[in-house]
Amino acid sequence: EDKVVQSPLSLVVHEGDTVTLNCSYEVTNFRSLLWYKQEKKAPTFLFMLTSSGIEKKSGRLSSILDKKELFSILNITATQTGDSAVYLCAVAGANSKLTFGKGITLSVRP
Amino acid sequence: DAGVTQSPTHLIKTRGQQVTLRCSPKSGHDTVSWYQQALGQGPQFIFQYYEEEERQRGNFPDRFSGHQYPNYSSELNVNALLLGDSALYLCASSLARGQETQYFGPGTRLLVL
């Protein structure tokens, strides 16, 4: 059975800090790993990663995948209060079915 | 460009009742997946529809069923509701061919009393 484990489950930081969110996985027929941000309801897409070692960046957010060690990290630099959310990691296996982790709750204090 | 839409936004039912949730995919998408998200948990895959057929299914009982229409919109039906069915139900759409990125709707919050 496909499995995704995220860590830590929650963290509290101050504005301006840098955070690293972790995601490890076990999946058959790996196709891609995706990161989403969930603030209230709809998870919003951040990144999709398919190849090891290629960093994806969007503003202060970046992510990288290691297919040998089966993990990914999501970095957020110069955090802002608007970054407070649940960050979900998911892996796409056979037929693009997504398996999610439990999510990481990030709280950024002013 | 309209994103994924879902209706209703909130719903309250009692045990034993039946419920139907609706989803319209993002323009140009042909595949719809449904997820159940309990409080404090990540979304759990229920099933996926493509070309009006259930393409694959997660570990959910037969009380959970669905349908996809020719215009790609989809319904999720849950029969004989249990208290444990209370959750946020998310619909996601994607393209069958190419990348796996799924775009989510705002969800339907179901409360079973």
Image (cartoon, coloured by chain):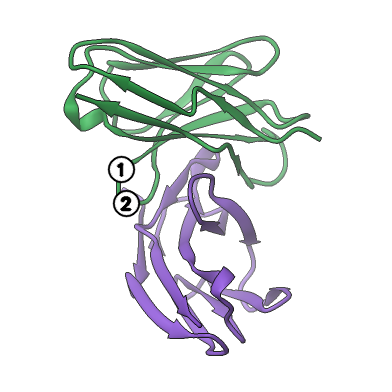
Chain colours: A purple, B green
Name the secondary structure under disc 2.
loop
Looking at this view, is B1 or B31 the one in front?
B1
Looking at this view, is B12 or B60 the one in front?
B12
**Coordinates of residue A94 in the picture (x, y in percent):** 50, 42
Identified at 76% across, 29% down, the residue is B27
Side (left or right) of A105 relative to A29: left
Q: Chain of mark 2?
A: B
Q: Chain of mark 1?
A: B
Side (left or right) of A48 relative to A86: right
Q: Answer few, some or many: residues within 10 Å of disc 1's Cα (few below 14, many 20 plus, some between 14 and 19).
A: some
User: Would you identify the image quadrant in which residue B57 lies?
Assistant: top left
Residue tagged by mark 2?
Answer: B41
User: Would you identify the image quadrant in which residue B64 lies?
Assistant: top left
Identified at 35% across, 28% down, the residue is B110
- The image's mark for residue B38 is 1
Name the secondary structure under disc 1.
loop
Quadrant housing the N terminus of chain B = top right
Q: Amino acid at mark 1?
A: Ala
**Coordinates of residue A106 in the picture (x, y in percent):** 43, 71
